[in-house]
Amino acid sequence: MAGPRWSVMKGTKVSTMRLPSAGFSITIRVAVTADSSAIGRLTTAVGEAGAIVTALDVVDSDHVRVVADLTCDTADTVHADQVVSALEALDGVEVRKVSDRTFLLHLGGKIEVSPKVTLRNRDELSRAYTPGVARVCMAIAENPADARRLTIKRNTVAVVSDGSAVLGLGNIGPAASLPVMEGKAALFKRFANVDAWPIVLDTQDTDEIVRIVRAIAPAYGGINLEDIAAPRCFEIEARLRDLLDIPVFHDDQHGTAICVLAALTNALRVVGKQIEDVRVVVSGAGAAGTAIMKLLLKQGVGDVIAYDRAGALHRGMTGLNPTHQWLVEHTNQANYSGDLPGAVKGADVFIGVSAPNLLTGEDIAQMADKAIVFALANPDPEVDPREARKYAAVVATGRSDQPNQINNVLAFPGIFRGMLDAQASAYTEDMALAAAQAIADVVGEEKVNASYIVPSVFDPKVAPAVAAAVTAVCRAASAPPEPVA
């Protein structure tokens, strides 16, 4: 594992283990003596403290002092405090205010309801609401399928969580999960014009969650399950799929798996290997890891070793939950039972959806020639990506400040857009394979390289391509069979 990065300032060492990111961006308002070196001293101090200056704006000045807003990315809250202290230690500098830009963005929430129709007079009110709305109600009562045509159901998704597995934060509960679910809803709208709404549940009982989601389902065209802990999430999804006539999609599982397969498709193009010939090690056999492995197996991967807290999942292990038992029966052809460094030795691909700093650069050096490393734990990957790049041909992370970010936003907006447009009643693995191929093809074989295996999340071609691929699968599945000659 790479050691901490040290910066020395006035005899004090400032240590940061994490890379700075926009998630810990701060704006510091400082007053500094107005001389020719003032601004340079500020930016130098921030750089020596290990932060990254992203903006500097002068907001006021006179003959004596300059007041400036200095915006910088830091690694975490402790590091942010260290950066502020470094500025306070400079001669002639007064720190007046520190603003956390992430908290400012969340003030009052991130989404709102906006009507699609105007209500300027009695005439419009009479058609949008009573008495005119009664006619529409009766039309739906006579033909329930019309709800998709005449209500928000045609374009609305419920983002449902019990707060039991929120990002890398664990079981923090429904209220604390709400900022994530709001963000998810905002992404749905931004990237696919899907109206989504957060539903956070004050229960972690499987039966109760299934009952509640089933009860609210008539208002929605799809259900996006989010941040529900494994193995409970598997049962909840399976039961809801049996009960509902709309798609149920657990993004932590399937969105991650789709993006990983898309990235792997292009990474294999870079290194010139075929998926049926490679051996893959997956660290983390929870919701995301299990879905990744199942989709890789569906795509015909050569072999997979699943590694979890209990070690490499292999035949002969006892006390396994049903999901791990399934993995034991379908992976690890050689029945490897050792540690993670031993598992990756000679492997073609490492995929991490687990915990930080599990491997070193030396471990990656023991992988096969032209190795592929997807270290996706956030914010700190399973292996330092800088170390991994010394030995692997292709490296990807889940971080936005590193090349090849594997991000679920590449998948879920377009998938739901396609399912809603096709009025799909269920989500299928064929949709997943089609979506992964669509994401990979947005990059294009002529442009793919070791630093560009997935498109940008802001590439406007991604969501439409995924939606079109999913819609095509839906239509093909519903088309009548070709007549036999």
Image (spheres, rainbow, N blue to C red):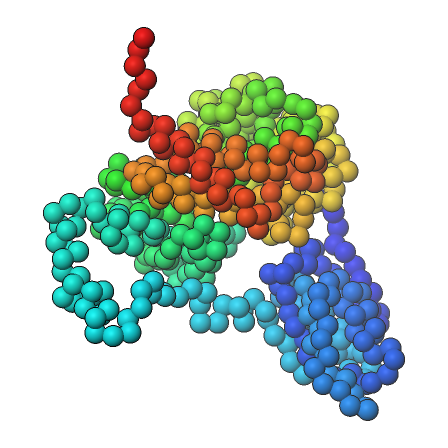
* Total number of numbered discs in the rendering: 0
Asked whether residue 175 appears in the rendered view, the answer is yes
Relative to 92, say whether 337 is above or below. Answer: above
Name the foreground residue: 191 vs 163: 191
| Left or right: 232 in relation to 447 | left
Q: Would you identify the image quadrant in which residue 388 lies?
A: top right
Relative to 130, say whether 35 is above or below. Answer: below
Q: Position of residue 216 (x, y in %)?
A: 25, 52
**In the image as oriented, which residue stretches furthest toward the right?**
36
Residue drawn where x is 59% and y is 69% of the image? 101
Residue drawn where x is 52% and y is 32% of the image? 437
Q: Position of residue 207 (x, y in %)?
A: 26, 46
For the C terminus, the image quarter is top left
Q: Would you identify the image quadrant in which residue 369 lies?
A: top right
Q: Position of residue 372 (x, y in %)?
A: 66, 32
Relative to 393, say whether 29 is above or below. Answer: below
Asked whether residue 252 appears in the rendered view, the answer is no
**In the image as oriented, which residue stretches furthest toward the front?**
123
Q: Position of residue 267 (x, y in %)?
A: 64, 32
Residue drawn where x is 36% and y is 66% of the image? 114
Residue drawn where x is 66% and y is 52% of the image? 401
For the N terminus, the image quarter is top right
Name the foreground residue: 457 vs 280: 457
Relative to 347, say whether 260 is above or below. Answer: below
**In the image as oriented, which residue stretches furthest toward the bottom?**
63
| Left or right: 90 in relation to 199 | right
